[in-house]
Image (cartoon, grey):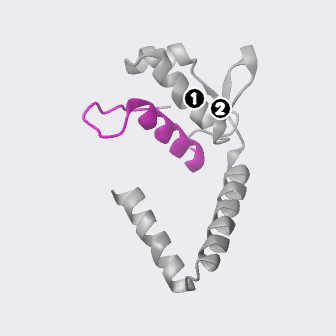
Amino acid sequence: MTLKIHIDDSAAPYEQVRAQISEQARSGVLPVGYRLPTVRGLAESLGLAANTVAKAYRALESDGVIETRGRNGTFVAAAGSAAERELASAAQTYVERARRLGLTEADALAAVRDALRAAYRG
C-alpha cells in the first residue's frame, strides 16, 4: 500500500488518506481481505497524528470500504456490492426528489453532470 500526503493540497490529510485507500480498494490495488497497517503504524509512516488516521479509518469503515476485526486488525472489506447498493439507493432518492420538483429527465441529468464535474475535476 502506497499513500502520499500533500501538505499543500486543499484536502485535509485525513481526507487524502481516506480517498487514497478507498480508490486503491475500489480498483483492486488493495484486494479484499488485505490487512491494513495499524492506525499508529500508518500515522508514523506518513508523519501524521494517530487521530488523523483514525478519523480516516472511521470514515472508511462507515463507507463499508474497510472492516475492523477487533484485535485481529483492519482489513479491506468486500465493499463493491455494498457501495453499489448504497449508490443505487441514493440515485433512486434523487430521482424521486427530482420528479416531485417537476424536473425533466434532461434537467435532472444536467444537475448530476454538473455535480460530478465539480466533484471530480474541481
Residue drawn at (29%, 38%), measured in percent from left and top? 9
Q: Which residue is mark 2?
A: 34
Q: Is residue 65 above or below residue 14?
A: below
What's the amino acid at mark 2? Tyr
The image quadrant that residue 6 belongs to is: top left
Amino acid type assigned to the residue bearing label 1 in the image: Tyr
Look at the image and say whether residue 105 sits in the magenta stretch.
Answer: no
Q: Assign a secondary structure to mark 2.
A: loop
Percent of width and height locating residue 75: 67, 29
Give the residues in magenta: 2-28
What is the quadrant of the C terminus in the image?
A: bottom left
5 drawn magenta: yes
Q: How many numbered marks have been drawn onto this rendered protein structure?
A: 2
Q: Nearer the viewer, residue 1 or 59?
A: 59
Q: Which residue is mark 1?
A: 57
Foreground mark, 2 or 1?
1
Estimate the x, y position of residue 87 in percent, counting from the top left.
Answer: 65, 59
Residue at horizontal 63%, vertical 71%? 97
As drawn, is 70 to the left or to the right of 44? right
Residue 95 lies, with reference to residue 21, above or below; the image says below
> CA gap, disc 2 to disc 1?
14 Å
Q: How many residues crowd around disc 2 within 10 Å: few (fewer than 14), some, or many (20 or more)?
A: some
Mark 1 residue crowding within 10 angstroms, few (<14) / some (14–19) / many (20+): many
Q: Which mark is first along the chain, 1 or 2?
A: 2
